[in-house]
Amino acid sequence: MTITPSSHDVRLHAIGTYLPSTRESNLERGAEFGFQSDFLKDVLGFVARSVKESNELTSDLCVRAFEDLCHRSRLKKEDVQLVTVVTQNPDVKIPHTAAIVHNKLGLAKPCMTFDISQGCAGYCHAVAITVGVMETTGLDHAVLFTCDPYTDIIDEHDKDVALLFGDAATASYFTRDGSGYRLIDANFGTMPDSHECLRCEDLLKMDGRAVFNNAAKQVPPSIIELLQRNQMAVDDVDRLLLHQASKYIVEFIRTRLEIPPEKAPFAAADYGNTVSSSIPLLLQECVSSCEFEVLLLSGFGIGFSWGNNLLKAVRAET
Amino acid sequence: MTITPSSHDVRLHAIGTYLPSTRESNLERGAEFGFQSDFLKDVLGFVARSVKESNELTSDLCVRAFEDLCHRSRLKKEDVQLVTVVTQNPDVKIPHTAAIVHNKLGLAKPCMTFDISQGCAGYCHAVAITVGVMETTGLDHAVLFTCDPYTDIIDEHDKDVALLFGDAATASYFTRDGSGYRLIDANFGTMPDSHECLRCEDLLKMDGRAVFNNAAKQVPPSIIELLQRNQMAVDDVDRLLLHQASKYIVEFIRTRLEIPPEKAPFAAADYGNTVSSSIPLLLQECVSSCEFEVLLLSGFGIGFSWGNNLLKAVRAET
């Protein structure tokens, strides 16, 4: 299905981000687990991880990303009609973190608030949800937050997860004018019998082999399927922004799709796998410059599930 | 904004429900707190509360609601392309409960799964989300679950909350043919400085006065606003299905809107406030008979937030 373009269509106009400045070096910690530095740099790909302050909540990180968004766009607080927070690490069980963010930002009363629990494919799910709600209910201004600070759910002695995850937050502004990217199409999937490959009651447990195998087997054909049903080929994609699960999996999917390295970057070496924030962190500069015509976003992980978004540039007529 | 009707539009076609058969009597427990039986029957309105088995998880209750849905519709498991679970009581922190339900039901791989954290207005939010995602991404078959079993987060000695909540689950089937109800329009809001009126880290804490005052002040005008922008009056609504927070609040909102009692039922006396499930429990028979032309759903609570859905009947041409 292709959305018919129109000058009033919803578009992703700007992205604000927040990466805590504190970094923990993996090169120092890796030796404890017997990892060679070559493995950390070239396979895992994470040399350091961003770490939030221990008293910073998910809502606090979202507020920092919103501040960056306000510097990068002319978003007015009083215009915001929809706040969604993609997280599996809410401040508390009740209320939803979006209501807390709404309050901390001093947003207006006519504003829809809800959280989306999804995981590493959460951003791709949330883009479809945000655009869908805006189109169905006629909203003009929405901010979609992502924030999954895993520092709080990682056993630092568990070698399967201790060196992977970084803390971050992002805030994506969707509106109906200005330059940006329109959602053209999206597809999604959930693998049967795989929901235990990533699991957390109090601390995260990961079966890394199962996660890799699912990503390697499911993600490339799902990307091809999305392109084909839009009469497009891999060469038509100007940038493939993959969830930064590890350098190895990004390289694997890119190579399988025969995409050159400059079109599918791995850029998380200095901050780690930031879960639902990994894709919007990559996307920020693309949205700001609007220099590429076609973007493909692909997230995968918890569930095991995946989602792909096909985006097309729309440039302001002014 | 009004959606232009079309024979292929998304509609709510059927609802399956699950109310645990176990009931706890409020008349017995109420005496401990010094509540008169008249207060329980006529003000609170809950004579008994439905209680799940202690080992039943949110995903288990969803599976029971799905079984009821399968008896009530011709939904085929292999057709389901979207599973959402509205809950603030997931089985675990990670993965989302929708992925666990997807696995327990044996659904197919091309299926989007995510949870929505919202609360008592969750169903109205989720209807707009589900319809929006289906329209934006071209999906034909979706199942929207609600399940917030509060038994696990209630201090039974806390008189503010101990006699209010019942356990339940529902499963709403959205598709593009057959009789049902189309979403015509929806509106939403979140009250500044009120997110602490319902809060849960481990156990639910409620400021009942703040919740009542917010509901009494915000909900009636939000309903009027939704009707007016669709050129409708209160008299055009055949059934107003209000979140069953208490008999008193249902009566208060109904009276404020000058709606006769038969058009805005309170029906939860025997099972309690089932949070996100309260509205679909009322809606089940309406959707099944499709006898009413215009329905208005109104949910309110945690956040403090609210949402209204305006639905219109669509009858199969066969």
Image (spheres, coloured by chain):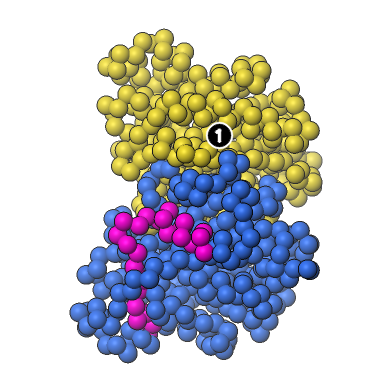
Chain colours: A yellow, B blue
Residue annotated with mark 1: A299
| Disc 1 residue type (three-letter) | Gly
Along the line of sight, which residue is nearer the eye, B68 or A42? Answer: B68
Say what secondary structure mark 1 lies in.
strand
- Residue drawn 71% across the image and 64% down it: B178
Q: Residue B295 placed where, x, y %?
A: 63, 75
Label 1: how many Cα within 10 Å (few below 14, some 14–19, many 20+): many
Q: Is residue B211 visible?
A: no
Q: Residue A10 placed where, x, y %?
A: 69, 48
Quadrant of the image occupied by residue A168: top left
- Residue drawn 22% across the image and 79% down it: B33
Q: Is residue B143 above or below residue B213?
A: above
Q: Is residue A55 above or below residue B148?
A: above
Chain ID, mark 1: A
Magenta segment includes B204: no
- Residue drawn 36% across the image and 19% down it: A26
Q: Is residue B178 visible?
A: yes
From this viewpoint, which residue is outermost toward the left? B32
Q: Is residue A118 above or below residue A283?
A: below
Along the line of sight, which residue is nearer the eye, B218 or B267? Answer: B267
Q: Residue A112 placed where, x, y %?
A: 55, 59
Left or right side of B45 for A257: right
Which stretch is magenta? B43-68
Magenta segment includes B62: yes
Quadrant location, the N terminus of chain B: bottom right
